[in-house]
Image (cartoon, rainbow, N blue to C red):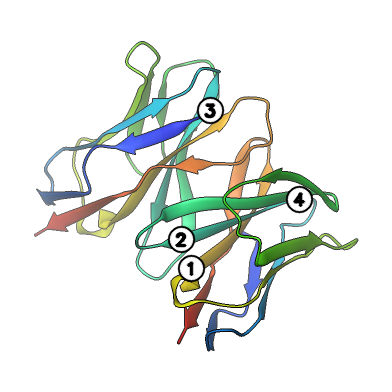
Amino acid sequence: DSGVTQTPKHLITATGQRVTLRCSPRSGDLSVYWYQQSLDQGLQFLIQYYNGEERAKGNILERFSAQQFPDLHSELNLSSLELGDSALYFCASNSYNEQFFGPGTRLTVL
Amino acid sequence: AQSVTQLDSQVPVFEEAPVELRCNYSSSVSVYLFWYVQYPNQGLQLLLKYLSGSTLVKSINGFEAEFNKSQTSFHLRKPSVHISDTAEYFCAVSVAGNTGKLIFGQGTTLQVKP
């Protein structure tokens, strides 16, 4: 158990819909990173937040957005979903240059 | 920009045989290097990391990797594999002293056969 929690574990939805993925970092960690794992793109960094502020941005689509709240949990919002958004979404928190990953949310868009 | 290349997508090996999973990276600045393992239907677990110091790093379950700056490589080795080592292995880099975001290779599936 990494100490990073993600909900829900599975999510099935239809094209055009909007979903929210939630992540809580390990106790004491201020950073949250979001990654997408898909068969064609592999593991890609999406976005990072540090203590409520956006710190780095990767290959995140404009239809996707994220935020980190005062209690340090983070939410990744995915809208106007397409079939190609089906993937495993991980979040991670960072401590002393080591990232601890949550179990992931598997998103299936039908 | 940084990139990571894992040279083998699949590596089949018999139990108790040695194995090497290859990883090369590209970067114009100093990087930290990592190997993560992903078991079926699970998240990513850190196997080992190189930040600085000794170029040979070891994990508690018998894996080791050597940072070779001149060859920009960070190959993962184990002298004798077990069935339980069957998993996907990811090499990753992050820019030293930066945001910590990880750039991953495409992954190598290690298949250990009895």
**Residue hosting label 1:** A88
Q: Residues within 10 Å of mark 3 (few under 14, many from 20)?
A: some
Residue type of the residue flagged with mark 2: Gln
Q: Residue furthest right?
A: A70
| A77 to B91, vertically: above or below | below
**Residue for point 20% across, 58% down:** B83
- Of tags 3 and 4, which is closer to the observer? 4
**Residue hosting label 4:** A49
Q: Is there CB contact under 8 Å for labels 1 and 2?
A: yes
C-alpha separation, residue under disc 2 versus residue under disc 3: 21 Å
- The disc placed on residue B32 is 3
Report in which chain the residue with disc 2 lies. Answer: A
Left-right relation of A16 to B92: right
Residue type of the residue flagged with mark 4: Tyr
Q: Secondary structure at mark 3?
A: strand
Residue type of the residue flagged with mark 1: Leu
| B73 to B46, vertically: above or below | above
Dot placed on the residue nearer the N-terminal end, 1 or 2: 2
Dot placed on the residue nearer the N-terminal end, 2 or 4: 2
